[in-house]
Image (cartoon, helix red, strand yellow):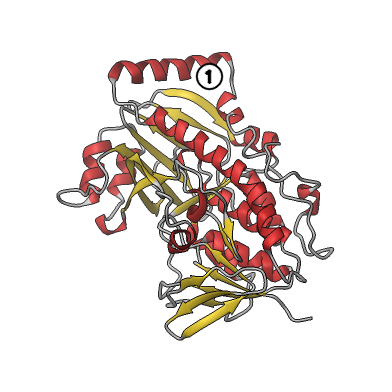
Amino acid sequence: MQQPRALVIGAGVGGLTAAAALHRRGWSLTVLERAVRLEPVGAGISLAANSQRALDAIALGDEVRALAAWQGGGGLRTPGGRWLSRMDSATMTERFGGPLVLLHRATLVDLLVSRLPEGVVRTGTAARLTDPGAAGRPARVTTEDGDHEADLVIGADGIDSAVRGTLFPDHPGPRYAGFTTWRVVIPAPDRPFEPHETWGRGRIWGTQPLKDGRVYAYGAAVAPPGGRAPDDELSELLRLYGDWHRPIPDVLASVAPQDVLRHDIRYMAEPLPAYHRGRVALLGDAAHAMAPTMGQGGNQAIEDAVVLAHHLAPDTADPSAALAAYTRDRLPRTMDVVRRSARSARMITLTSAPAVAFRDAAIAAIGRLAPGIAIRSFDGVADWRPPTPTYPAGHGGSQDRTGPGRTGENT
C-alpha cells in the first residue's frame, strides 16, 4: 500500500509536533518553512500538564518534564512588591499531573526536530496553497520549485495564516486584544528571586526561571496597535517598569536593546466555521490565536497536532472523515480556551485606579479565604488528556500518564 503523504506549511511548535506525530503513524512528511533558518521568535513558552501528556504520544513528555525549573513558591505581586496571592509548584503538579515547564522555544523546536527524519524540514521554502483538494483529488501546494500534491496539507503558518485566508477568505481573522507585549531571555540576576507575575494599572510584568539558568521575562501594557518606542524598546521598558519591585530593575539592567521582542496581541474573537476544508487542516494560531494570559497558545497547538494525528490512520486514502472529527474535537475546546484567555486579559488591562484597587483587594481576599483558587482556574484546561494512544506499543512515551482520554471536552 502506498504511504500517504502530508505537507506541513510552517515549522513552528504546532507544525513540527504534527509532523512528528504523523511520522509515527506512518505518513510521509515534508515540512515547508519560509524562514531560511529555524530561529524561533517568542523567547519563552510555557508547557502545562495538558501539552505534556500530548507530547507523551511522540515520546517527548518526560524530556519536557525534566526541564521544569519552577521549584517552591511564587505568585502574584503589586508593583510595590506586595504579594497578592501565592502558589507553589508542588500543588500545580499534584492537581494536574505534571509541573508547569517554562523553556525557550528554541529548546522545544530542537526537541521536536529530533523526532523527525533528516531532510523532512525544508527551510527557505515559501509555500502557497493553490487547491485544498477533495475526495478523489489531492491538495496542491505551490513553491518556487513547482507544484506539490499531497493527501493532506496542514496549515500551521501562524496568526497571519495565508492558508486560512485561502480556505475562509470571508473570515475577519484575529482581532487586536488592546495590549502589546515585550519578551526577553537573559542570564539570571545575581540576587535570587521567586517566580512572579506583577500586575499594575494596564501593565503586567513576569519574571520566570529557565532550567538552563537563564531568566525569561515579559511585560504587557495597554497601547494602541502598531506602536513602537520613540527611541528603543528597552527604554520603553525602563519607563514602564523601571521603578517596580526587584528583581525587575535587575532584569532590565541585564537587557540589551536588540534582545527585546515586541508584538501586538491579537486573538480569534470570531471562531472559524471549521478547522478544515477539503484535504487541509488548520492548527495552532492559524486556527485559534489567543491572548497569552493563560499561557495556552503553544499548548493548544500541541494538542491540535496530536489529536489530528490520532484521527489519521496510515491507510487513510481520503481524510475527509478524519478532518471532520478533528474539527468536532478541537473547535469547541480551543474556542473555550480563547474566551477564557480573553477574560483573563480584561483583568490585566484595567487602567482605572478604583478598578485596579478593587481587583487587587479581591485577589488578596480570595487568596486568604480560598488558597489555591488561582490554580483551580486552570481546571478544564490543564487537566485535559489526549485520545487513547493508537501508536505502536512501546512508542507512545509515558503511557501510564496518558490513559483513556477524552478529547474535545473539558475533563
Residue with the mark numbered 1: 367
Observer able to see residue 213:
no
Q: Position of residue 331 (x, y in %)?
A: 59, 46
Number of numbered discs = 1
Q: Position of residue 238 (x, y in %)?
A: 23, 42
Q: Please report the residue visible at 28 percent of the width from the left and 47 percent of the height from the top.
A: 253
Q: Quadrant of residue 275?
A: bottom right
Q: Position of residue 16 (x, y in %)?
A: 57, 65
Note whether 45 is above or below 206 in the view shown.
below
In the rendered image, the quadrant that contains the N terminus is bottom right
Q: Please report the residue visible at 57 percent of the width from the left and 60 percent of the height from the top.
A: 277
Q: Which residue is nearer to you in this view: 199 or 162? A: 162
Observer able to see residue 289:
yes
Asked which secondary structure carries label 1, the reply is: helix
Q: Please report the residue visible at 42 percent of the width from the left and 72 percent of the height from the top.
A: 34
Q: Quadrant of residue 77?
A: top left
